Image (cartoon, rainbow, N blue to C red):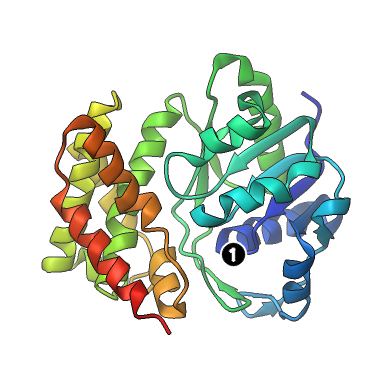
Amino acid sequence: MKEIQTTAIVGMGALGLLYGNQIAAELGTSAVRFIADKERIRKYKEMNFTVNGERRSFPVEDCEAAAPADFIIAAVKYNALPAALDTMKHCVGPDTTIISVMNGISSEQIIGERYGHEKVLYSIAQGMDAMKFGAALTYTKFGELRIGVRTPDQADRLKAMTDFLDRAKIAYVAEDDILHRLWGKFMLNVGVNQTCMAYETTYSGTLTPGEAHDTMVGAMREVIALAKAEHVNLTEQDLEDYIRLLETLSPDGMPSMRQDGISHRPSEVEMFAGTVGRMAKKHGLSTPVNDRLYERIKEMEAHYS
Protein backbone atom coordinates (compact mmCIF):
# COMPACT_ATOMS: atom_id res chain seq x y z
CA MET A 1 0.00 0.00 0.00
CA LYS A 2 1.21 3.51 -0.79
CA GLU A 3 1.58 6.13 1.91
CA ILE A 4 -1.64 7.84 2.98
CA GLN A 5 -1.44 11.55 2.23
CA THR A 6 -4.99 12.78 1.59
CA THR A 7 -8.03 12.36 3.83
CA ALA A 8 -11.70 12.95 2.99
CA ILE A 9 -14.21 13.15 5.83
CA VAL A 10 -17.96 12.72 5.38
CA GLY A 11 -19.77 14.34 8.28
CA MET A 12 -19.03 17.53 10.24
CA GLY A 13 -20.38 16.34 13.56
CA ALA A 14 -18.34 16.01 16.74
CA LEU A 15 -16.06 13.21 15.55
CA GLY A 16 -15.70 14.51 12.01
CA LEU A 17 -14.53 17.87 13.34
CA LEU A 18 -12.37 16.24 16.02
CA TYR A 19 -10.38 14.23 13.49
CA GLY A 20 -10.41 16.89 10.79
CA ASN A 21 -9.02 19.44 13.21
CA GLN A 22 -6.27 17.08 14.40
CA ILE A 23 -5.17 16.08 10.90
CA ALA A 24 -5.13 19.72 9.76
CA ALA A 25 -3.12 20.76 12.84
CA GLU A 26 -0.45 18.10 12.35
CA LEU A 27 -0.30 17.63 8.57
CA GLY A 28 -1.72 20.90 7.22
CA THR A 29 -5.11 21.87 5.80
CA SER A 30 -4.13 20.47 2.40
CA ALA A 31 -4.08 16.97 3.92
CA VAL A 32 -7.77 16.90 4.81
CA ARG A 33 -11.09 17.99 3.30
CA PHE A 34 -14.73 17.53 4.11
CA ILE A 35 -17.00 16.18 1.40
CA ALA A 36 -20.62 17.27 1.11
CA ASP A 37 -23.43 17.90 -1.32
CA LYS A 38 -24.31 21.42 -2.46
CA GLU A 39 -27.09 21.87 0.11
CA ARG A 40 -24.85 20.97 3.04
CA ILE A 41 -22.03 23.13 1.68
CA ARG A 42 -24.39 26.12 1.75
CA LYS A 43 -25.23 25.35 5.40
CA TYR A 44 -21.58 24.89 6.35
CA LYS A 45 -20.65 28.26 4.80
CA GLU A 46 -23.12 29.95 7.12
CA MET A 47 -21.56 28.36 10.21
CA ASN A 48 -18.62 29.71 12.18
CA PHE A 49 -16.94 26.54 13.39
CA THR A 50 -15.00 26.62 16.65
CA VAL A 51 -12.93 23.98 18.44
CA ASN A 52 -12.58 24.58 22.17
CA GLY A 53 -13.50 28.20 21.59
CA GLU A 54 -11.04 28.87 18.76
CA ARG A 55 -12.30 29.68 15.26
CA ARG A 56 -11.55 27.02 12.64
CA SER A 57 -12.15 26.77 8.91
CA PHE A 58 -11.80 23.64 6.83
CA PRO A 59 -11.81 22.93 3.10
CA VAL A 60 -15.22 21.62 2.02
CA GLU A 61 -15.49 20.05 -1.43
CA ASP A 62 -18.54 19.38 -3.58
CA CYS A 63 -18.97 15.61 -3.63
CA GLU A 64 -19.79 15.65 -7.36
CA ALA A 65 -16.42 17.23 -8.16
CA ALA A 66 -14.34 15.37 -5.58
CA ALA A 67 -11.17 13.49 -6.46
CA PRO A 68 -10.16 10.11 -5.00
CA ALA A 69 -8.67 10.22 -1.50
CA ASP A 70 -6.18 7.86 0.09
CA PHE A 71 -8.27 7.67 3.26
CA ILE A 72 -11.98 8.26 3.96
CA ILE A 73 -13.55 8.68 7.39
CA ALA A 74 -17.30 8.06 7.62
CA ALA A 75 -18.46 10.20 10.56
CA VAL A 76 -22.23 10.46 10.18
CA LYS A 77 -25.30 9.31 12.07
CA TYR A 78 -26.66 5.85 11.34
CA ASN A 79 -29.69 7.15 9.47
CA ALA A 80 -27.42 9.28 7.25
CA LEU A 81 -25.20 6.40 6.11
CA PRO A 82 -27.05 5.66 2.82
CA ALA A 83 -26.64 9.30 1.73
CA ALA A 84 -23.01 9.29 2.93
CA LEU A 85 -22.23 6.34 0.68
CA ASP A 86 -23.40 8.40 -2.29
CA THR A 87 -21.50 11.46 -1.06
CA MET A 88 -18.18 9.60 -0.98
CA LYS A 89 -18.53 7.80 -4.31
CA HIS A 90 -16.04 9.97 -6.26
CA CYS A 91 -13.54 9.83 -3.39
CA VAL A 92 -13.18 6.05 -3.51
CA GLY A 93 -10.25 5.06 -5.70
CA PRO A 94 -8.50 1.71 -6.26
CA ASP A 95 -6.27 2.09 -3.17
CA THR A 96 -8.59 4.04 -0.87
CA THR A 97 -8.91 2.87 2.72
CA ILE A 98 -12.18 3.57 4.54
CA ILE A 99 -12.95 3.56 8.25
CA SER A 100 -16.18 4.27 10.08
CA VAL A 101 -16.20 6.09 13.41
CA MET A 102 -19.93 5.56 13.64
CA ASN A 103 -21.62 3.82 16.52
CA GLY A 104 -23.09 0.35 16.14
CA ILE A 105 -21.90 -2.93 14.65
CA SER A 106 -23.11 -2.77 11.04
CA SER A 107 -21.62 0.26 9.25
CA GLU A 108 -18.43 -1.52 8.10
CA GLN A 109 -20.48 -4.30 6.53
CA ILE A 110 -22.72 -1.78 4.75
CA ILE A 111 -19.77 0.25 3.45
CA GLY A 112 -17.96 -2.91 2.34
CA GLU A 113 -20.98 -4.14 0.41
CA ARG A 114 -20.94 -0.90 -1.59
CA TYR A 115 -17.21 -0.32 -2.12
CA GLY A 116 -15.48 -3.63 -1.40
CA HIS A 117 -14.77 -5.24 1.95
CA GLU A 118 -11.04 -5.20 1.25
CA LYS A 119 -11.04 -1.38 1.47
CA VAL A 120 -12.65 -1.24 4.92
CA LEU A 121 -10.69 -1.45 8.16
CA TYR A 122 -12.70 -1.97 11.34
CA SER A 123 -12.37 0.77 13.93
CA ILE A 124 -13.85 2.07 17.17
CA ALA A 125 -13.52 5.64 18.42
CA GLN A 126 -13.54 5.64 22.21
CA GLY A 127 -12.50 7.57 25.30
CA MET A 128 -13.27 11.04 23.93
CA ASP A 129 -15.71 13.45 25.55
CA ALA A 130 -16.33 15.56 22.46
CA MET A 131 -19.59 17.50 22.35
CA LYS A 132 -20.89 19.65 19.49
CA PHE A 133 -23.75 22.10 19.71
CA GLY A 134 -24.37 24.15 16.61
CA ALA A 135 -20.93 24.87 15.15
CA ALA A 136 -19.06 24.65 18.47
CA LEU A 137 -16.99 21.56 19.27
CA THR A 138 -15.64 21.17 22.79
CA TYR A 139 -13.60 18.37 24.32
CA THR A 140 -11.12 17.73 27.10
CA LYS A 141 -10.20 14.13 26.16
CA PHE A 142 -9.28 13.28 22.57
CA GLY A 143 -9.63 9.54 23.12
CA GLU A 144 -8.22 6.90 20.81
CA LEU A 145 -8.99 4.66 17.86
CA ARG A 146 -9.06 0.91 18.20
CA ILE A 147 -8.38 -0.47 14.74
CA GLY A 148 -8.01 -3.88 13.12
CA VAL A 149 -8.41 -6.00 10.02
CA ARG A 150 -11.34 -8.03 8.79
CA THR A 151 -9.05 -10.56 7.10
CA PRO A 152 -5.27 -11.22 7.34
CA ASP A 153 -4.67 -10.03 3.77
CA GLN A 154 -5.38 -6.45 4.94
CA ALA A 155 -2.11 -6.33 6.92
CA ASP A 156 -0.40 -3.94 4.47
CA ARG A 157 -3.44 -1.66 4.53
CA LEU A 158 -3.37 -1.62 8.33
CA LYS A 159 0.35 -0.77 8.32
CA ALA A 160 -0.24 2.18 5.98
CA MET A 161 -3.05 3.33 8.28
CA THR A 162 -1.05 3.13 11.50
CA ASP A 163 1.85 4.98 9.83
CA PHE A 164 -0.61 7.76 8.95
CA LEU A 165 -2.08 7.86 12.46
CA ASP A 166 1.44 8.16 13.86
CA ARG A 167 2.15 11.15 11.61
CA ALA A 168 -1.20 12.77 12.49
CA LYS A 169 -0.58 12.09 16.21
CA ILE A 170 -3.90 10.30 16.57
CA ALA A 171 -3.70 7.79 19.42
CA TYR A 172 -4.62 4.23 18.46
CA VAL A 173 -4.36 0.60 19.46
CA ALA A 174 -4.09 -2.09 16.77
CA GLU A 175 -6.41 -4.88 17.92
CA ASP A 176 -5.93 -8.59 17.25
CA ASP A 177 -9.66 -9.24 17.82
CA ILE A 178 -11.40 -6.15 16.53
CA LEU A 179 -14.85 -7.79 16.44
CA HIS A 180 -14.72 -8.33 20.20
CA ARG A 181 -13.81 -4.67 20.64
CA LEU A 182 -16.57 -3.59 18.23
CA TRP A 183 -19.19 -5.48 20.20
CA GLY A 184 -17.79 -4.08 23.45
CA LYS A 185 -18.21 -0.52 22.19
CA PHE A 186 -21.72 -1.41 20.99
CA MET A 187 -22.53 -2.72 24.47
CA LEU A 188 -21.32 0.52 26.04
CA ASN A 189 -23.30 2.69 23.64
CA VAL A 190 -26.48 0.67 24.03
CA GLY A 191 -26.16 1.37 27.74
CA VAL A 192 -24.84 4.91 28.12
CA ASN A 193 -26.22 6.61 25.00
CA GLN A 194 -29.77 5.44 25.49
CA THR A 195 -29.78 5.88 29.28
CA CYS A 196 -28.47 9.44 29.08
CA MET A 197 -31.17 10.32 26.58
CA ALA A 198 -34.05 8.51 28.29
CA TYR A 199 -33.18 9.91 31.73
CA GLU A 200 -32.01 13.29 30.39
CA THR A 201 -28.75 13.00 32.29
CA THR A 202 -24.96 13.18 31.97
CA TYR A 203 -22.22 10.60 32.39
CA SER A 204 -22.26 11.19 36.14
CA GLY A 205 -25.98 10.44 36.24
CA THR A 206 -25.41 6.97 34.82
CA LEU A 207 -22.64 6.23 37.31
CA THR A 208 -24.59 7.27 40.41
CA PRO A 209 -26.40 4.34 42.09
CA GLY A 210 -30.08 4.39 41.20
CA GLU A 211 -32.55 3.67 38.41
CA ALA A 212 -30.53 5.22 35.58
CA HIS A 213 -27.42 3.23 36.51
CA ASP A 214 -29.40 -0.01 36.83
CA THR A 215 -31.01 0.62 33.44
CA MET A 216 -27.65 1.22 31.78
CA VAL A 217 -26.14 -1.96 33.21
CA GLY A 218 -29.26 -3.98 32.38
CA ALA A 219 -29.19 -2.85 28.76
CA MET A 220 -25.50 -3.73 28.53
CA ARG A 221 -26.07 -7.21 29.97
CA GLU A 222 -28.66 -7.88 27.28
CA VAL A 223 -25.95 -7.15 24.70
CA ILE A 224 -23.61 -9.63 26.42
CA ALA A 225 -26.25 -12.36 25.97
CA LEU A 226 -26.81 -11.35 22.36
CA ALA A 227 -23.07 -11.31 21.61
CA LYS A 228 -22.69 -14.85 22.92
CA ALA A 229 -25.49 -15.94 20.60
CA GLU A 230 -23.48 -14.34 17.78
CA HIS A 231 -20.33 -16.24 18.90
CA VAL A 232 -18.61 -13.15 20.34
CA ASN A 233 -17.36 -13.74 23.89
CA LEU A 234 -18.34 -10.56 25.73
CA THR A 235 -18.17 -10.95 29.50
CA GLU A 236 -19.00 -9.19 32.76
CA GLN A 237 -15.34 -8.19 32.88
CA ASP A 238 -15.80 -6.30 29.60
CA LEU A 239 -18.80 -4.53 31.12
CA GLU A 240 -16.79 -3.53 34.18
CA ASP A 241 -13.92 -2.30 32.00
CA TYR A 242 -16.26 -0.04 30.02
CA ILE A 243 -17.84 1.31 33.20
CA ARG A 244 -14.32 2.26 34.34
CA LEU A 245 -13.80 3.97 30.97
CA LEU A 246 -16.92 6.06 31.60
CA GLU A 247 -15.47 7.08 34.95
CA THR A 248 -12.54 8.75 33.15
CA LEU A 249 -14.79 11.09 31.17
CA SER A 250 -15.96 14.53 32.23
CA PRO A 251 -18.82 13.99 34.73
CA ASP A 252 -20.83 16.77 33.08
CA GLY A 253 -20.23 15.38 29.60
CA MET A 254 -22.86 13.57 27.59
CA PRO A 255 -22.93 11.15 24.65
CA SER A 256 -24.28 11.87 21.20
CA MET A 257 -27.85 10.69 21.82
CA ARG A 258 -28.30 13.05 24.77
CA GLN A 259 -26.94 15.86 22.59
CA ASP A 260 -29.48 14.85 19.94
CA GLY A 261 -32.26 14.95 22.52
CA ILE A 262 -31.34 18.44 23.67
CA SER A 263 -31.26 19.66 20.06
CA HIS A 264 -34.46 17.74 19.13
CA ARG A 265 -32.64 15.81 16.42
CA PRO A 266 -33.57 12.24 15.44
CA SER A 267 -31.52 9.84 17.57
CA GLU A 268 -29.79 6.57 16.79
CA VAL A 269 -32.19 4.46 18.86
CA GLU A 270 -32.84 2.22 15.84
CA MET A 271 -29.14 1.40 15.70
CA PHE A 272 -29.05 0.58 19.42
CA ALA A 273 -32.26 -0.83 20.96
CA GLY A 274 -33.71 -1.39 17.49
CA THR A 275 -30.76 -3.57 16.45
CA VAL A 276 -30.75 -5.38 19.80
CA GLY A 277 -34.46 -6.18 19.50
CA ARG A 278 -34.23 -7.40 15.92
CA MET A 279 -31.20 -9.60 16.55
CA ALA A 280 -32.62 -10.93 19.83
CA LYS A 281 -35.79 -12.03 18.06
CA LYS A 282 -33.65 -14.05 15.66
CA HIS A 283 -32.10 -15.89 18.60
CA GLY A 284 -35.25 -16.19 20.71
CA LEU A 285 -33.87 -13.88 23.42
CA SER A 286 -35.86 -11.37 25.48
CA THR A 287 -34.55 -7.81 25.92
CA PRO A 288 -36.97 -6.03 28.28
CA VAL A 289 -34.59 -3.21 29.25
CA ASN A 290 -33.81 -2.27 25.67
CA ASP A 291 -37.48 -2.61 24.78
CA ARG A 292 -38.38 -0.08 27.48
CA LEU A 293 -35.64 2.29 26.35
CA TYR A 294 -36.82 2.02 22.76
CA GLU A 295 -40.39 2.90 23.72
CA ARG A 296 -39.33 5.79 25.96
CA ILE A 297 -37.01 7.36 23.37
CA LYS A 298 -39.54 7.00 20.57
CA GLU A 299 -42.09 8.69 22.82
CA MET A 300 -39.68 11.56 23.49
CA GLU A 301 -38.98 12.01 19.78
CA ALA A 302 -42.70 12.02 18.99
CA HIS A 303 -43.07 15.19 21.08
CA TYR A 304 -40.39 17.19 19.24
CA SER A 305 -41.89 20.33 17.75
Q: Is residue 209 above or below residue 106?
A: below
Residue under the point 64% across and 55% down: 19
Residue 214 horizontal/vertical position (percent):
13, 59
Relative height, residue 99 to residue 200 (above, below)? above
Q: Nearer the viewer, residue 43 or 281?
A: 281
**Lateral position of residue 154 relative to residue 185, left or right:** right
Q: Nearer the viewer, residue 232 or 155?
A: 232
Q: Quadrant of residue 13?
A: bottom right
| Residue drawn where x is 66% and y is 41% of the image | 165
Residue to which mark 1 is pinned: 13
- Quadrant of the drawing holding the N terminus: top right
Pick out the residue farthest to the bottom: 305
Q: Callout 1: 10 Å neighbours few (<14), some, many (20+)?
A: many
* Rendered residue at 22%/64% (across/down): 207
Can you say which quadrant of the picture contains the C terminus?
A: bottom left
Could you tell me if residue 234 is visible in this image? no
Q: Residue 249 at what x, y percent from top left?
A: 38, 63
Q: Residue at x 76, y 47 (%)?
A: 7
**Outermost residue toward the left in this view:** 210
Query: Where's residue 290, x and y in %?
Result: 22, 53
Left or right, residue 211 beside residue 238: left
User: Where, by quadrant of the figure, is residue 58 drawn?
Assistant: bottom right
Task: Report the front residue among 209 and 295.
Answer: 295
Q: Amino acid at mark 1?
A: Gly
